[in-house]
Image: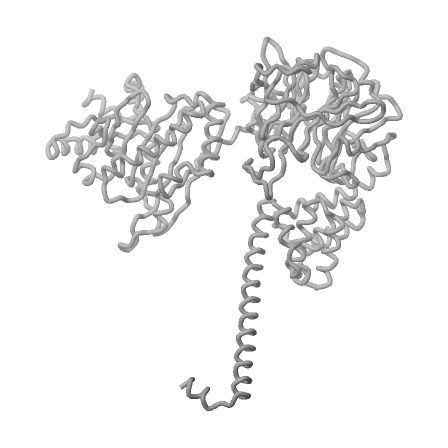
Amino acid sequence: MLIKAFSTMNFRDLYKYLRKIRCITLITLIFLGLSSQTNVYAQNITQVKKWMKEGSYGKALNVLNNNDKTAKNPDHLLLRAICYYHTDQIDNCLTDLKLHESFYTGDALLWKYSGLCFIKKEQYEDASKYLKKYLSLSKSTQEDYQKIILEVRRCGKAQQIARKNLDAFVENAGSIVNSSENEWRPVYSPNFQDRLYYSSNKKGSTGGKRNQKGLVDDEEGQYYADMYYSDFIEGNWSEPTTFLPLLNTPKHDLIGDFNSEGNILYYGLTSDFVSYDYYSDTFSTEYLYDKIPVKVALPLQGEFGDKDVFIFNDSLLFFASRHLPGYGGYDLYYSKFTGGKWQNPVNLGPDVNTTFDEISPFITNGGNTLYFSSDRIDGFGGYDIFWTEYHNNTKKWKEAVNMGKPVNSPWDENHFLLAADGMSAVFTSNKEGGYGGSDIYITYFKEQKIEQLLFVDQPSFLDSVQTKSIVAGDISDNKIQKKLLRLPSLYYVTNDDLLSAQNIGLLSKLSENLLIYPDTRLTIYAHSNVESNRDMELYLTLKKAETISGFLIQKGVDPYRIVLKACGSSFPISQPFINGIASNVAEKNNKRIDFSLISISADINVTEERTNLSGVYLDERYELFRKAEDTLVFRLLIAQTQQMFRSELLNHYKEIFIEKTQNQPTNHYLLGQFAAYDEALKTKKILQQQYNVNAAMIPYYKGKPLARELYGYMSKTMPELQKFVLNEE
């Protein structure tokens, strides 16, 4: 038909017809292209929001800046403004907020970020006005409501502090020391008067570019910090010299402090600025390659975030901690070195610490003046540097004083250290006007800080009775906060992803905690979904438990502290079948590894993180099993093998699991969780009569076989155990 139609057309009509078809096709292609671009942009915005939630504002900003649609969409414009704020591009943030305001969306975040920007610009009256506007449009139950109230109060305080400037001059250390990246933790050399040590993640640092997980990422990663030093020669800083091999690593290498003689360096390693490992090195200008830095036994726990080490006279150490009992956030602590060891850390008390963060301690050589950084309300914004003096008469630290301008700003100032002559000091700040990131600054005082010229063996505050201080480890104090240890479940789909990157990260943290608390014992529970072959199902979950155990042992955990319990599908957390149909929920949740700690230290709280299921999805067998692990139950040992156990018993009785410990080479197949002795005895007789199995009955208490020597004592309060003792022993 189409050919016949063409044959009846003259040439001119045919040309017009084909041209029309081509236009329609072109329009269709353009529409499809625009539709495709729209979908891609929508996907990009979804990724942008995900990155922002993770704190990766730089990545999100790059996407928003590379699309001309951003400026035309008020929602996306606001997203970009927020990214600008969190990457310290305040003027760009204000520009986007002004554009967003012209759309009249009424979004309250406009007022919030406008106010926060004006704090950074030190325009505190405008900042307060915008933040109050945000509060008026917000509910008091919002997560940031109380925080914004504090910022409004801070605006009023900042205007008062700004009137009391410090009699000093501040200058940036310059482009030779500082870079477009971050410079942190400046420390004066104890041996060379004009030498400054510090850490920097400038271009070319050891390990190359890495992402937030510490993995190599040349495209979007950042350099991790190395340690450097620079000499001040004839009015100029020398080119920074990097530390020699073995000291700088692929992680962030952060300067801590030197001992008084300057021949031992203490420094920290971290990948995330959340947990740290601390090392010491015998320091010399001629590095000895056969002397490897070693982990140092300090009274702080880097794995819980303890940081900012400052050493006074080799026998007194200060640091910041947020996990020890305190007053909120990071607090400052000290520890004395006596009797050949560091003593329990002591909180500096409520005259120094607050509900906000206190970090970066430094105490003068005279021992009575303490400098530190805090984000408390009496500041310009971010972290400010404060100082306080100890009064020998009142036996108290006086109220801390903000150092004021020109040292402090609405940004972050920390790591303050006085020079030996008391005429200058160094600190770090990410304030505007620097070279990028955090820079090192130098403060020159018009009046010498005499406290730095005095030398004492022990600060006088140690002589007084610290009645208000908190001693870590003193469990009689009802303010003591136990350390929280989380035990998450590990999920897998196949054997290959049992040791996935995520699971390895969780296992690494678990191994670190097991090494910290050597008196704990770990039970590994391996679960699976229903398989066709019951004997293989149980045996394979044992192999999965052994894989997890092997990883922990490789990390240094004593194998005799680990018990394996391979459960197969005996105790599913989710119903394997719903209305006769295999459940996707079960497939996802039943394939997992659970953990439990026994013989737990008194100073830790353990939280076992479990999947919360309810209704039709929940299988009560798991809950019954976990409850049985916490009480007295009787179990029947039906087999001891070194290989796979095959028996019809496995199909008939569903509550069977394998238990294995390192001091027993055999696999113990256990049946049941009988709360009543008579019920266990009945099943034991059935096994003998029908299956010719002489099962041994074993009382379990708190998840492990009850020691025989405890039978007599515990049977006095446990009637079922008393029956067992009378009939089985």
Query: Camera-side residue: 538 or 221?
Result: 221
**Residue 355 appears anywhere in the view:** no
Residue 231: image location, x then y, percent: 77, 23
Q: Is residue 679 left or right of residue 402?
A: left
- In the drawing, does residue 321 fall left or right of residue 662? right
Residue 559 at what x, y percent from top left?
38, 22
Do we see residue 96 in this rendering?
yes
Q: Residue furthest front?
A: 11
Q: Farthest residue to the top: give it.
A: 339
Which is nearer the eye, 380 or 708?
380
Count of marks overlaid on the render: 0
Residue drawn at (63%, 47%), measured in percent from left and top? 57
The image's colouring method is one colour
Q: Which quarter shows the N terminus?
A: bottom left
Residue at point 74%, 16% (across, down): 190
Q: Position of residue 496 (x, y in %)?
A: 38, 39
The x and y percentages for residue 28 are: 53, 73
Specify the quadrant that holds the C terminus: top left
**Residue displayed at 54% across by 64% down:** 36
Quarter assignment of residue 598: top left
Position above or below: 27 against 689 = below
The image shows residue 233, relative to residue 17, as above or below, that is above
Q: Is residue 395 above or below residue 703?
A: above
Quadrant of residue 66 within the rendered picture: bottom right
